[in-house]
């Protein structure tokens, strides 16, 4: 190959790759592992949580009285038991999954799976010191939950978490407030 042709092809390839890299960086979502709480104590996180609000998705559509119960297993994984009642059919729905650390065990970055080997990010990004209230982000700004050890959450905590979510790029218009009877 002649040198001028080689330089032209190399230049076009470099520009093309640079454009792809630039586009990928500009559209890349936040790395939620960096937002996850530090000094996370998985033992204290275990137990029952009530869903206060969520971004709706297929499994949770029309659900009220939603809870998530986390149980630490002997192998260090976490069993996740999600339940709720469908307001249209009055049927109780349950989904059991598993979670595990997404790297550093002292960090609130977890992976959760309800479908075999497929895991999604589940990151505890806000958590009060007494482990009573939590804000969870899922991947790609598509999932968000406000959780409480009680069926309600104080307005001051709720507002703090919502402000954090909005500053993190979450569209709060998508939020569904969970009915807890």
Image: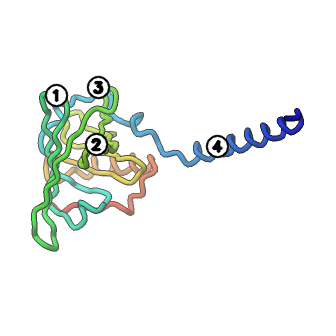
The residue most toward the front is 1
Residue for badge 2: 117
Q: Which mark is residue 10?
A: none
Compare marks 4 and 1 and give the one earlier in the sequence: 4
Q: Nearer the viewer, mark 3 or mark 2?
A: 2
Tell which of 103 and 52 is nearer to you. Answer: 103
Compare marks 3 and 1 and give the one earlier in the sequence: 1
**Badge 3 vs badge 4, beta-carbon distance below 8 Å:** no
Where is residue 85? Give x, y as percent: 13, 63
Where is residue 7? Give x, y as percent: 84, 35
Q: Which mark is residue 22?
A: 4
Residue for badge 1: 75
Q: Nearer the viewer, mark 3 or mark 4?
A: 4
Where is residue 170? Give x, y as percent: 42, 53
Compare marks 2 and 4 and give the one earlier in the sequence: 4
User: What separation in Å lies between label 3 and label 2 (alpha carbons)?
Assistant: 23 Å
Describe the element under mark 3 as helix, strand or loop.
loop
Residue for badge 3: 106
In the rendered view of the protein, which quadrant contains the N terminus?
top right
Describe the element under mark 1 as helix, strand or loop.
loop
- Residue drawn at x 52%, y 45% is 28
**Badge 2 vs badge 4, beta-carbon distance below 8 Å:** no
Q: Decide: is 173 above or below 99.
A: below
Describe the element under mark 2 as helix, strand or loop.
loop
């Amino acid at each position: 190959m002649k040198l001028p042709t080689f330089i032209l092809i190399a230049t076009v390839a470099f520009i093309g790759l640079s454009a792809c890299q630039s586009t990928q960086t500009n559209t890349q979502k936040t790395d939620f592992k960096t937002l996850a709480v530090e000094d996370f104590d998985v033992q204290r996180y275990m137990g029952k949580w009530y869903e206060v609000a969520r971004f709706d998705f297929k499994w949770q559509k029309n659900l009220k009285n939603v809870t998530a119960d986390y149980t630490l297993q002997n192998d260090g994984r976490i069993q996740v038991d999600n339940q709720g009642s469908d307001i249209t059919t009055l049927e109780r729905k349950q989904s059991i999954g598993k979670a595990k650390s997404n790297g550093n065990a002292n960090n609130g970055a977890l992976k959760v799976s309800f479908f075999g080997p497929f895991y999604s990010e589940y990151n505890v990004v806000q958590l009060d010191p007494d482990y009573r209230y939590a804000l969870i982000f899922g991947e790609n700004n598509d999932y968000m939950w406000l959780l409480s050890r009680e069926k309600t959450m104080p307005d001051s905590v709720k507002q703090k978490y919502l402000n954090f979510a909005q500053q993190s790029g979450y569209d709060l218009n998508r939020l569904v407030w969970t009915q807890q009877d």
